[in-house]
Amino acid sequence: MTETSAIKSLRDFIASESAGGIVLMVAAAAALVVANSGFFGAYSGLLDTPVSFAAGSLVSIDKPLLLWINDGLMALFFFLIGLEVKREILTGQLRSWQQASLPVFAAIGGMAVPALVFVAINAGEPANIRGCAIPAATDIAFALGLLALLGSRVPVALKALLLAIAIIDDIGAIAIIALFYTENMNLMALALALVPALAMLALNKLGVARSIPYFIFGAILWVLVLKSGVHATLAGVLTALFVPIAAGDERPLERLEHALHPWVAFLVLPIFAFANAGVSFAGAGAEALFAPLSLGIAAGLVLGKQLGIFGSCWLAVRFGIASLPPQVGWRHVYGLSCLAGIGFTMSLFIGGLAFVDPAQIDAVKMGVLTGSIISALVGLTVLAGASRTPAPDSASRGEEGVTVPIR
């Protein structure tokens, strides 16, 4: 891929994600309105509707509609994440340490510090500790959607940095789901899952560019992973890793990525948001927000993300390990750190894996919504006051004039 086409692909991706973020906001707002209206009963009843699928005596899946959305439809979202991760590592922002160093440090800090903030607030509530990964996530669609509202005030390099941080963040979230939210494994189903995985590996080695065979074996893999007890959405990530970057003159991975973006951005994620953001505030006072679970999530998203991302970036630049991108100053980085506290999609998803108690799930929703809204408002305010091009030395100096050496 030439430099020009790479930049064009990045701009197209950002435009798609930005517009999708706005649709996502509308879907989340609609869920909140419905959940706090006379339609709440119908809303809950719809999500609890049992949906069954059977293929003779071989396969039988019986789940409420909400779980079909979270386990099935979201597998497409994770499939797209897998495609993006593979592309970025092999040909994009993460293909070299020089390019990846700053977002790697930022993402690690942006996952670790929010989790530590959550644990500190919930230290006396052992039943809540399973939720420590909830504030570690960043919602790329929401964040880029808000960045789009600022237009040319935000340099493209800052959007690319946010994109790279979010992709590394997603890798961390996938690892967390695989390691900590998998229980009661069926080893036979897991062993059988190797069959479609090996079939897709063979397709990759043979240079098969058509998408249909990967989708067929990916669907079989999804069923077996679901039956194994491992979270089924991980099948989407695994399937994506087998799709070849190039096959002859064709580029299957990029073709699939571009084809899926509109469906994920304008259908999958809005449906997920509408199904999961509906929390009723009836009878909920200030004490509900200041309960350890919801407060830990909100504080992790607001304070943890700012400290983790901005602090990691400053330390990496201060010690000469990384450098800021062109036209990006420290105010831009701080605004980005705030916007990264929008944890909506992945935070709600992890919350649904961590807890089954409806009261805890409602607390998760309240914490995620509160933390995300505060992060969005603070981030927009900071970036609205930032110039598009920083002062000549701003990439090598702190805001207060402290010299920061950069290689």
Image: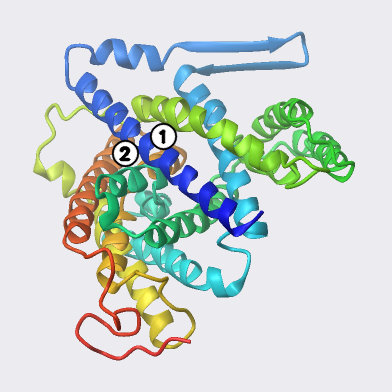
Query: Please, what is the three-letter code of the amino acid marked with disc 2?
Result: Gln
Per the image, label 2 sits on a secondary structure element best described as helix
C-alpha separation, residue under disc 2 versus residue under disc 1 = 7 Å
| Residue at 19% in and 61% down | 382
Give the image location of residue 194, x and y in percent. 81, 39
Image: 365 above or below 111: above
Query: Please, what is the three-letter code of the amino acid marked with disc 1?
Result: Val
Give the image location of residue 263, x and y in percent. 51, 27
Residue 175 seen by the camera: no
| Residue at 39% in and 35% down | 20
Image: 393 above or below 36: below
Per the image, label 1 sits on a secondary structure element best described as loop
Residue 345 seen by the camera: yes
Circle 2: is it few (<14), some (14-19), or many (20+) Cα within 10 Å? some
**Which image quarter holds the N terminus?**
bottom right
Q: Is residue 198 left or right of residue 34?
A: right
Q: Which residue is mark 2?
A: 360
The reply to whether the C-beta atoms of the residues labelled 2 and 1 are less than 8 Å apart is yes
Dividing the picture into quarters, in which one does residue 328 lie?
bottom left
